[in-house]
């Protein structure tokens, strides 16, 4: 497939980029610093201002899928969504956050007393992004939330999928590596199961 990846050199975007290239997809890396994108076969890098709706839409045109992997505080969700719609790319996948997941029924993780204060603004911006997507009736979007602990511990290929509830393991821990998150994201790209839905991945 032709995949446009916004934020291809970031914490989550880097592993998604690597996984997509390893699977043989054609990847357009849309980034602020194209020189940071590895030069390799089936990869094109472009500098883009994600706040310029029209320029972003033009950069997205002709792709099969758009994946955005950018900090929510650094983005305008409406501009991103509008750019995808203007580009007529048929699918839009978003690297989400864990804060919007339910820790207990009816209570989002970001609203629990244990949630770190330093991450609250970013998490609440992610909640708003998901709310914007849920208003879209015609856009084929998917929002993938990681578990609470989003770590760089490597790829296992073994994980569980959930919906709107935080996943925890037998020890009561909620975690997923960025590498396994990337596997789950590319699985969804290749075999869509969550049209206009949020889902989550964890061990």
Image (spheres, rainbow, N blue to C red):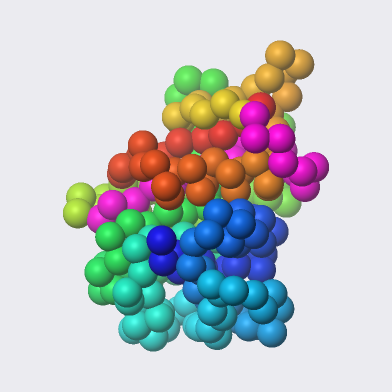
What is the residue that sits farthest to the top in this orientation? 170
Which quadrant: the C terminus?
A: top right
Instruction: Tell me if residue 175 can be seen.
Output: yes
From what the image shows, is residue 83 above or below residue 162?
A: below
Report the front residue among 8 and 169.
8
| Residue 159 rendering spot, x and y as whole percentages | 62, 29
First to last magenta residue range: 139-158
> Which residue is depicted at the point 56% across and 80% down?
45
Q: Is residue 42 left or right of residue 65?
A: right
Residue 98 located within the stretch drawn in magenta: no
Task: Give residue 31's quadrant in the image.
Answer: bottom right
Q: What number of labels is visible?
A: 0
Residue 146 located within the stretch drawn in magenta: yes
Which quadrant: the N terminus?
A: bottom left
Report the front residue among 107 and 88.
88
> Which residue is depicted at the point 48% across and 43% down?
187
> Which residue is depicted at the point 66% across and 56% down?
15
Report the front residue among 181 and 133.
181
| Residue 85 rendering spot, x and y as whole percentages | 27, 67
Task: Give residue 29's quadrant in the image.
Answer: bottom right
From what the image shows, is residue 193 above or below residue 17?
A: above
| Residue 126 rendering spot, x and y as whole percentages | 51, 51
Instruction: Tell me if residue 73 can be seen.
Output: no
Q: Is residue 32 left or right of residue 161?
A: right
| Residue 55 rendering spot, x and y as whole percentages | 39, 85
Q: Main secondary structure of the magenta part?
A: loop
What is the residue that sits farthest to the right in this orientation? 153
> Which residue is depicted at the point 57% across and 26% down?
160
Q: Is residue 133 left or right of residue 171?
A: left
């Amino acid at each position: 497939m032709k995949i446009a990846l916004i934020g291809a050199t970031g914490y989550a975007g880097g592993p998604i980029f690597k996984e997509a290239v390893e699977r043989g997809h054609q990847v357009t890396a849309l980034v602020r610093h194209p020189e940071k994108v590895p030069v390799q076969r089936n990869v094109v890098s472009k500098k883009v201002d994600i706040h310029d709706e029209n320029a972003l839409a033009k950069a997205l045109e002709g792709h099969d899928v758009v994946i955005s992997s950018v900090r929510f505080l650094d983005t305008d969700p409406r501009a991103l969504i509008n750019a995808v719609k203007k580009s007529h790319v048929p699918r839009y996948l978003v690297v989400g956050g864990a804060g919007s997941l339910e820790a207990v029924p009816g209570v989002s993780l970001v609203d629990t007393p244990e949630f770190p204060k330093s991450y609250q603004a970013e998490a609440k911006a992610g909640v708003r992004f998901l709310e914007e997507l849920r208003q879209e009736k015609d856009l084929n979007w998917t929002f993938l939330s990681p578990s609470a602990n989003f770590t760089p511990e490597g790829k296992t290929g073994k994980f569980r999928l959930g919906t709107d509830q935080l996943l925890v393991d037998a020890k009561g821990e909620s975690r997923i590596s960025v590498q396994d998150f990337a596997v789950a994201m590319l699985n969804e790209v290749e075999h869509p199961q969550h049209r206009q839905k949020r889902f989550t991945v964890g061990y």
